[in-house]
Image (spheres, rainbow, N blue to C red):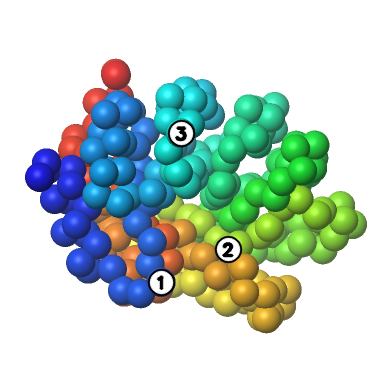
Amino acid sequence: MTDIQKNILSIKTELGEGVRLLAVSKTYPIENILTAYKIGQRDFAENKVQELCEKREKLVNYDIIWHLIGHLQTNKVKYIAPFVDYIHSVDSLKLLIEINKQAQKLGRSIKCLFEFYIASEETKFGLTLQEAERIINSEEYKKMENIEICGVMAMASFSNNEELIRTEFKKLKKIFYELKKKYYFGISEFREISMGMSSDWKIAIEEGTTMIRIGSNIFGKRNYNN
Ligand SMILES: *Cc1c(COP(=O)(O)O)cnc(C)c1O
């Protein structure tokens, strides 16, 4: 067994029921994806549209579930709309309109998560609860038939402060339940809380994550120059 396979199996022993492991394959080669695939890993996540498209093209014959977890520009939605399963990074009405439009053209439905801004440090992307509610209450949103909102996603601060990270995850969980109660009560598709990466996934599990996004803990140290 390879290290990649050992890492996946070891993480999986710590996941409770209802928590999915997404292997974040950004910057790693196709061979690494296949190594993970061989022991049953099916959910893979990328953060860049071009890289996602290139990898998917080479792996078109594999039953992989593809997740986009990075910022998505409206003009790039069309490239991933034919095959992407989950888009975790919905951070504007404009983007959601475009995802719905492209999915409609293809006669499919795309699962989406609202990305929230929960970190105490400055990051560029993510909604506040109010902004998400503004989207949900818009006339455009109510007419959408080709997207399925299935939950919320966020990144915690890059920090060693465990209590800070825990507080941020709690914030996301609270947002999830607030939206669930107000807009998605009884809608079983709205069930995902996407939080937790290599450095903080154990805290995320304690705080109720349903999807952890792990890259370097599976595939090894990342080389961004690849
Ligand atoms: C890269 C990335 C991850 C995984 O990061 P690791 O620290 O390698 O586990 C998770 N989520 C997002 C949004 C990412 O961009």
Tell me if 137 is positioned left or right of 159 in this view: right
- Is residue 77 at least partly visible in the picture? yes
- Look at the picture and state if 79 lies above or below 174: above
Q: Label 1 near label 3: C-beta < 8 Å?
A: no
Where is 53 relative to 65, above or below?
A: above
Q: How many marks?
A: 3
- As drawn, which residue projects farthest toward the front? 61
Q: Residue at x 62, y 74 (%)?
A: 188
**Callout 2 environment at 10 Å: few (<14), some (14 to 19), or many (20+)?**
many
Q: Residues within 10 Å of mark 1 (few under 14, many from 20)?
A: few
Find numbered disc 2 in the image and state the secondary structure of the residue it sits on: strand
Residue labelled 1 has its Cβ within 8 Å of some atom of ligand 1: no
Quickly name the residue at label 1.
18
The C terminus sits in image quarter: top left
Question: How far apart are the alpha carbons under marks 2 and 3?
Answer: 28 Å
The residue identified by callout 2 is 151
Which residue is pictured at 43% across the width and 24% down the height? 58
Q: Earlier in the sequence, mark 2 or mark 3?
A: 3
Q: Nearer the viewer, residue 68 or 223?
A: 68
The x, y position of residue 165, in whole percent, is: 34, 62
Q: What's the amino acid at mark 2?
A: Gly
For the residues marked 1 and 2, what is the alpha-carbon distance in whole angstroms? 14 Å
Dot label at residue 61:
3
- Residue at position x 77%, y 43% in the image: 107
Which element type, helix, strand or loop, lies under badge 3?
loop
